[in-house]
Image: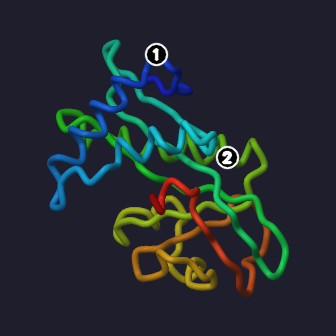
Amino acid sequence: MISIRSSTQADCDAIDAVIRAAFAGTEFGHQGEAELVAMIEADGDALVSLVAERDGLIAGHVLFSRMDVEADGAPLSGAGLAPVSVAPERQGQGIGDALIRAGLEELRARGAAISFVLGHADYYPRFGYSPELAARFASPFAGPHFMAMMLGDTAWPECGRADYAPAFSR
């Protein structure tokens, strides 16, 4: 049984270990994702940080951080999903999916209007992320892997700007 909850300070070492292990096995390897999470937390830009526990151990983590978003000339409450990590031995069991869905629900409950992600075009659309929506926003991360989703019933903006938390540029 998996339980998902907000992360706590006591989870930091376990989250770091899960992130490092999860990304070590990818095509590009660990490229500072654990350090990024620590910087976002230290800067106070974390909006939603959730962990998945299984058998008393942290099996996964997702972080949504504050973004500076403008849409059609007005500020818009936005969050960036990065990273989502699942311990290698727990991958393929729906943990990442459950973390992302729980995080999106938490963002909605907090009144966030839009979420962005930079990731696999075959994975994130299942949650509602769209490269077509993200293409309407100027961003240093613009491209085919940059996706966005509205978190409510708001119509898609015509244009805008989307900047991740400052930690992403360090």
Quarter of the image where one finds residue 162: bottom right
What colour scheme does the image use?
A: rainbow
Furthest toward the top, the residue is 56
Compared to 69, does 85 lie above or below? Answer: above
- Which is nearer the eye, 53 or 70? 70
User: Which label was assigned to residue 45?
Assistant: none
User: Which label was assigned to residue 10?
Assistant: 1
Q: Amino acid type of disc 2?
A: Leu
Mark 1 lies on a secondary structure that is helix
Residue 139 left/right relative to 36: right
Furthest toward the front, the residue is 170
Pointer 2: what residue?
A: 107
User: What residue lies at 49% left-to-right and 80% top-to-bottom?
Assistant: 142
- Which is nearer the eye, 138 or 145? 138
- Which is nearer the eye, 128 or 87? 87
Residue 95 position in % (x across, y down):
36, 38
Compared to 125, does 138 lie above or below? Answer: below
User: What residue lies at 49% left-to-right and 46% top-to-bottom?
Assistant: 100
Residue 22 position in % (x across, y down):
24, 42
User: What residue lies at 57% left-to-right and 62% top-to-bottom?
Assistant: 164
Residue 150 left/right relative to 145: right
Residue 55 position in % (x across, y down):
31, 14
Sequence-first tag of 1 and 2: 1
Residue 117 position in % (x across, y down):
49, 63
Mark 2 lies on a secondary structure that is helix
